[in-house]
Image (cartoon, grey):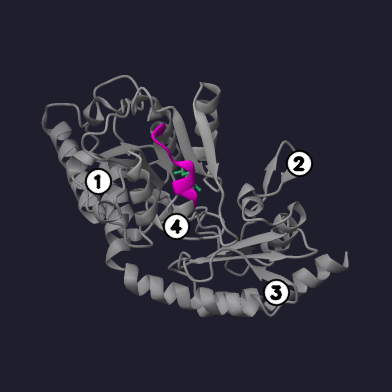
Amino acid sequence: MPELIYLDHAATTPLSRCALEAMMPYLTEEFGNPSSIYQPGRKARTALDNAREKIASLFGAHPDEIYFTSGGTESDNWVIRAAEEFGDKRKRLVVSSVEHHAVLKPAQEMQRRGFELSLLPVDRSCRVLPETLRKEADEKTALVSVMMANNEVGTIMPIAELASTAHEVGAWFHTDAVQAAGHIPINVEKLGIDMMSFSAHKFGGPKGIGGLYLRRGIRAGPGQLGGGQERGLRAGTENVAGAVGMAAALEESCRRMEENASRIAALRDRLIRGVLQIPGAILTGDPKNRLPGNASFLFEGASGEAIVFLLDRSGICASSGSACSAGALEPSHVLLAMGYSEEAARSSLRLTLGEENTEADVTEVLKVLPGIISRLRAE
Ligand SMILES: Cc1ncc(COP(=O)(O)O)c(C=O)c1O
């Protein structure tokens, strides 16, 4: 059995060796609870504090602005549900229509609880334009939430402009940076971000740990009730090994960001050029402002799910924007918001490259994909 070619790094990434090594002591002999006052507890507390400091400095934040959570979903839910606390007269949420469901679903819940919800349209390349936000945000807006980079098509949003537009009307600005963190430079201060969600397993860290950056002075939460962990805002015994692994993975990703981004983007561009040779193939997302590893397409007349299935038979792991819910194949809300038809949206393929991918991987995809598309179109 030949080795698998993994091209789904937007779904999750392999655990990096440095993250594993950093975590090992806290999964074995250093098992103390950071709330305990005796020596093993103190050691765990120190490890947690160090992880928090490292993450804060990599994002240009203060350590007391970083809260550990179980991942991107929890961080997003926390922030959106906290909108109620952002001012009595502010009962409006403005979020982009291409957000992950971890933002959209709690936003819809807030709407059921009496909030006004405004979904920002995107252009054909999946960008939210600051002028679009300017029209939608007003003095009743509690929170604006626009993701830093889209998980399906990889488009990077103009975050600094969007944040300052939100601030013009006195709203807080949250960004879901789950796909961006560790892949593109982020400085919360320079970008004017008030709240930011991130998740370790998208940048070589372990699954089930993430974080929320919450600017000093913002009252949001508690996200979870119980003990007094995370300064009383997120109860529950901390995932010490996870936090340590996340910090190590983020540090390594940031240290190697430039080198990795240029190498991966070169592979991506070769992949895109090759795939666009297939008749009727369309590149989705912004051709320039996109994540280094994202290559996403539409193939008129072929089903995305079937392409993924046949690629898998050739040992290639990929994904389609379509989500299978209750047995029905739902076209991606992202592609629909970008103006593609339901039929086009059902023909999507997302290939997301990572550090371990090689020229040979790209060559293999370019060898098998044209045949798969022709075969599906002939069916
Ligand atoms: C943009 C975005 N937000 C949130 C999430 C959810 O993150 P997690 O898996 O850490 O809960 C994902 C996961 O794919 C994502 O891509």
Three-letter code for the amino acid on which mark 2 is drawn: Ala
Q: Is residue 311 left or right of residue 271?
A: right
Q: Residues within 10 Å of mark 3 (few under 14, many from 20)?
A: some
Question: Which one is closest to the eye, mark 3 or mark 1?
Answer: 3
Q: Please name the residue that numbered disc 4 is placed on.
A: 157
Question: Which one is closest to the eye, mark 4 or mark 3?
Answer: 4
Q: Earlier in the sequence, mark 4 or mark 1?
A: 1
Q: Residues within 10 Å of mark 2 (few under 14, many from 20)?
A: few
Q: Please name the residue that numbered disc 1 is placed on.
A: 25
Three-letter code for the amino acid on which mark 3 is drawn: Val
Residue 368: assigned label: 3
Alpha carbon of mark 2 to alpha carbon of mark 3: how far? 28 Å
Three-letter code for the amino acid on which mark 4 is drawn: Met
Q: Please name the residue that numbered disc 2 is placed on.
A: 328
- Tag 1 near tag 2, CB within 8 Å: no
Q: Which residues are magenta?
A: 132-141
Looking at the image, residue 356 lies above or below residue 266: above
Question: Which one is closest to the eye, mark 4 or mark 1?
Answer: 4
Three-letter code for the amino acid on which mark 1 is drawn: Pro
Q: Which residue shows up at 33% across the image and 53% down it? A: 20
